[in-house]
Image (spheres, helix red, strand yellow):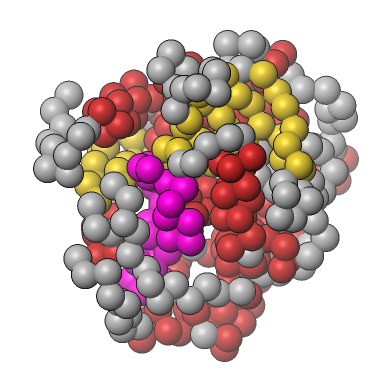
Amino acid sequence: MSSDFIEIAVTPTSFLAYSIVGIACLSAIYSILGTLLTFFQYIRVGQKRFFERIDRPTPPTKALDPIYGTHEMIKLKSSGVSLHYVSKGVPNQPMILFIHGFPECWYTWRYQMKYFAKDYRVVAIDQRGYGVSSKLPFVFDYRVEALAGDVADVIEQLGYESCILVGHDSGGFVAWTTAMLYPHLVEKLIVMNSPHPVAFRHDFSLSQIHRSWYMFFSQTPLVPETLFQADDFSVFKKAYHGKGSRLVNRNNVTDEDIDVYKYTFSQPGTTKAAVNYFRALFRYQSDFSRAEVTAPVLLLWGCQDPTLCEELADASLKYCSDLRVQKISTSSRWINQDVPDAVNKYMEVFLNENTPSEHTYDF
């Protein structure tokens, strides 16, 4: 594909979804829906249980298991933001840097960190606003360019000229953006269940609008945070084990694993910050005129994803010089936890490739 600027024609549906009027109308519609869901849950579980929050001052034992690495903090030179991260390996090894999505944290990469620590320095961050990482007060602070800037600082401040960058869900959106804004820092890019940002915007169909209802609901003040925290974060149990979005292999995320996520979101300000990611996505839209990603890209896609249309994976091909898409029909959106063995093997083959022509996987 040519490196010239890409002309992006916006479809009527996409234009409606991303216009100021469209965002306002869709946010109003889904605000009503989300508020009703919040009210019904309040009625169903009762006031005491609805507002119950368990105090979690220290991380669960599973989060502190040294098999994943050591917990550290890093203060970023460009923004002054402090990020929590978990790292294993030594500096002279090539680095794989992992970026989590919503509503997760560094721990979502535990299967990959254990697997790749033998050959790489593995680093998984808690993005700004998550857990004990810095909380910033404004929606503006969670623009995707700012998040990509954090990633760029982490790479450089850990002593690397480039790395293998891996992102999932909204963390994939950050990884794509980092590869576009800082191409010299990304040797290879691996993304899971997250389309290229321009593909997401350009191919925003009516079906995708419905699937993205929570993004529009997130534009509502206060109510999304209240619903997310309700019943001591029961949303995690529903997400991983409930109908619709649950894992295929539910034993891969136990109640003890869910406690790690609950600990992360129990930290003051985390829920608001996480919701602000979606608020910023629509309020501060990025114009990626030069949308092409030049680094080799592996896009892994769990097909049982209720939040993103599978077609968005194929649409991402238009914006990459070297992209291979691997769909896994037996996986949910939580692909890195749902089918970790398959994910690790696909990653390993991709990382060992020497030429762009080796695109065939057979496991």
225 left or right, relative to 236: right
For image coordinates 34% across by 35% down, the residue present is 331
In the picture, residue 280 is in which quadrant?
Answer: bottom right
Q: Say whether residue 217 is left or right of residue 180.
A: right
Q: Quadrant of residue 200?
A: bottom left
Range of magenta residues:
179-208
Q: Quadrant of the C terminus?
A: top left
Q: Residue at x 73, y 37 (%)?
A: 74
Q: Is residue 277 above or below residue 16?
A: above
| Residue 126: quarter of image | top right
Q: Position of residue 279 (x, y in %)?
A: 65, 66
Question: Above or below — where is 112 with respect to 308?
Answer: above
Q: Is residue 333 visible?
A: no
Q: Is residue 321 magenta?
A: no
Residue in the picture at 47% in, 17% down: 117
Q: Nearer the viewer, residue 321 or 238?
A: 321
Q: Position of residue 305 (x, y in %)?
A: 39, 47
The answer to which of 258 and 98 lies nearer the viewer is 98
Q: Is residue 321 above or below residue 30?
A: above
- Work out whether residue 349 or residue 216 is closer to the camera in this orientation and state it: 349
Question: Measured from the top left, where is residue 52 in percent x and y?
Answer: 84, 38
Q: How many marks?
A: 0
State the image coordinates of residue 284 (x, y, percent, origin top left): 61, 74
Q: Nearer the viewer, residue 269 or 98?
A: 98
In this orientation, does residue 294 appear?
A: yes
Query: Is 53 on the left or on the right of 345, as rendered?
Result: right
Residue 193 located within the stretch drawn in magenta: yes
In the picture, the quarter occupied by the N terminus is bottom left
Residue 50 lies left or right of residue 108; in this view the side is: right
